[in-house]
Image (tube, helix red, strand yellow):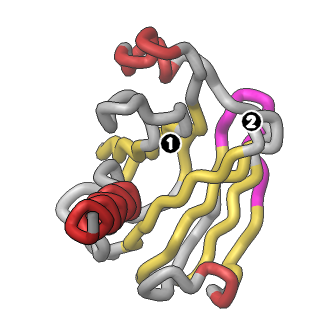
């Protein structure tokens, strides 16, 4: 009976550790490299239809709040200094304007969906190619870690 209890406890710990690993997240220290932070917010909630990137990108998210923070490593979001707060327009477009080179964290807050998405960004000047725009897809990820929650950088 004692071995049974230990095995049950150990299996519970393993399950909790697996859940805490969050396999869909990018590795710590991964930054989307851009020369400018402007583009559009897109996304949809449609289950398996979300596999189509073209379909997800056809749904513009308007009036979404974007908050740009100075990057801090670890989970220190409450203490990150705010650089700028803007809102996407009716067509989902946004533009943070000129930004100093450095590391930032972008929060995309969609009140209609009651969700927040986070992306780490590095503004690098110069880069081999200038950033034309970024597409920020805030669609929920599917259970296989596909179809949403991504930032696509488009170069000139």
Residue at the (52%, 34%) spot, across then down? 140
55 with respect to 53 (left or right): right
Residue of label 1: 136
Query: Which numbered tag is attached to residue 90?
Result: none
**Percent x, y of residue 27:** 26, 66
Badge 2 crowding class, 10 Å Cα cut-off, few under 14, some 14 to 19, many 20 or more, is: few
Residue placed most toward the observer, 47 or 99 = 47
Residue at the (81%, 43%) spot, across then down? 111
**Percent x, y of residue 128:** 18, 62
Any magenta on residue 91?
A: yes
In the displayed image of the protein, which residue is found farthest to the front? Answer: 1
Please say whether residue 43 is visible from this viewpoint: yes
Q: Which residues are magenta?
A: 86-93
Instruction: Classify 109 as above or below 152.
Output: below
Residue at the (53%, 59%) spot, across then down? 118
Residue of label 2: 113
Element type where label 2 sits in the image:
loop
């Amino acid at each position: 009976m004692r071995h049974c209890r230990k095995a049950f406890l150990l299996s519970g710990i393993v399950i909790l550790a697996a859940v805490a690993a969050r396999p869909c997240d990018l590795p710590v220290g991964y930054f989307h490299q851009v020369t400018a932070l402007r583009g559009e917010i897109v996304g949809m909630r449609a289950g398996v239809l979300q596999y189509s990137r073209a379909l997800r990108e056809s749904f513009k998210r308007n009036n979404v709040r974007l908050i740009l923070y100075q990057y801090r490593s670890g989970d220190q979001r409450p203490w990150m200094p705010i650089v700028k707060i803007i809102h996407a327009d009716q067509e989902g477009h946004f533009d943070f304007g000129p930004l100093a080179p450095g590391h930032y964290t972008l929060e995309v807050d969609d009140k209609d969906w009651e969700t927040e998405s986070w992306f780490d960004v590095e503004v690098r000047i110069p880069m081999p190619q200038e950033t034309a725009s970024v597409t920020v897809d805030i669609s929920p990820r599917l259970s296989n870690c596909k179809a949403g929650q991504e930032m696509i950088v488009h170069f000139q």
